[in-house]
Amino acid sequence: MIDFKEKTIAEIVSSDISAASIFKKHQIDFCCGGNKTIATACEEANIDVSLIINDLANSKKNSAIPQLNFNKWNKDFLIDYIVNVHHTYIRQNIDIVNEFGQKVASVHGEHAPETIKISALFSKLTEDLKTHLEKEEKIVFPAIKAKLADSNYLFDTEVIHLLEDEHDNAGTIVKEIQKLSNNFTPPEWACSTYKAFYFKLDEFINDLFQHIHLENNILFSKFRNN
Ligand SMILES: [Fe+2]
Ligand SMILES: [Fe+2]
């Protein structure tokens, strides 16, 4: 059996992306705080490490679908994948999730004031993301591709740190949303829009975690090692 305890969270998710949902379920940050071992992260978050290790072991047993091995991908292709899959997902979903949030906040905000905060936090997150994606697509990703094609190309690695800081800021907002929404659990009396809002928020944040994981732990770290 794999000794999960000694591995970092980023290593585990990099070798098997399905582990991402297990870390998310236990509210362990795998994209921005991925450089810790499971034991350390659990100790800090006051979570029983054996619960997570059991879930990981069970998910290995049950997974019959071949996993994508992002680690082995050519970095040019990884960049194209991130843009085509994750950036496109964000752009296609920002408006609808914001619309649900505003509707729920205006109809239910009086009885469930957290929905007003969640809607405002999500709107802030998506405004930040719009400029972040532009920065990656127009400046940083082309520079990484140029560096990959020509090792003499001058590339200022400071921009990588800037993007990682922006990922951290997004992670802070996401944690707040997770807490306020009780990990995306609507109340029993919730209407369909309320349920749809939490469902889409959960989906959006799952996608965002995987996206940031690919950038922080695979694309940028490999690039830094070059
Ligand atoms: Fe991105
Ligand atoms: Fe990013």
Image: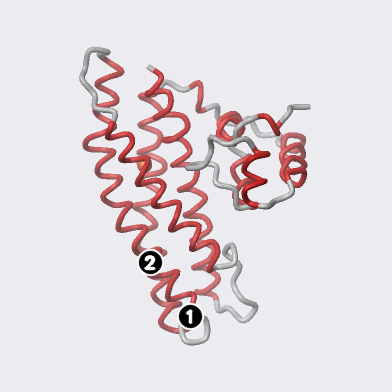
Q: Is residue 24 left or right of residue 57?
A: left
Residue 181: which quarter of the image? bottom right
Task: Give the mark, 1 or 2, whose residue is nearer the N terminus.
Answer: 2
Give the image location of residue 91, x and y in percent: 34, 52
Q: Above or below — where is 193 with respect to 93?
A: below
Give the image location of residue 139, x and y in percent: 22, 35
The crowding category of the residue bearing disc 2, from other C-alpha atoms within 10 Å (few below 14, some 14 to 19, many at least 20), is some
Q: Residue at x 68, y 52 (%)?
A: 46
Give the image location of residue 61, x and y in percent: 77, 35
**Residue 113, disc:** 1
Amino acid on which the number 1 mark rests in the picture:
Pro
Instruction: Check if mark 1's residue and mark 2's residue have beta carbons within 8 Å.
Output: no
**Residue 8, disc:** none
Q: Residue at x 45, y 77 (%)?
A: 104
Q: Residue at x 41, y 70 (%)?
A: 119
- How far apart marks 1 and 2 lie (CA) works out to 16 Å
Identify the secondary structure beneath mark 1. loop
Q: Residue at x 78, y 27 (%)?
A: 1
Quadrant in the picture for the C terminus: top left
**Residue 98, disc:** 2
The crowding category of the residue bearing disc 1, from other C-alpha atoms within 10 Å (few below 14, some 14 to 19, many at least 20), is few
Q: Is mark 1 within 8 Å of ligand 2?
A: no
**Number of dots carrying numbers:** 2
Give the image location of residue 58, x and y in percent: 77, 40
Q: Is residue 72 left or right of residue 63?
A: left
Frontmost of labels 1 and 2 is: 1
Amino acid on which the number 2 mark rests in the picture:
Asn
Picture colour scheme: secondary structure
Identify the secondary structure beneath mark 2. helix
Q: Above or below — where is 169 with respect to 109?
A: above
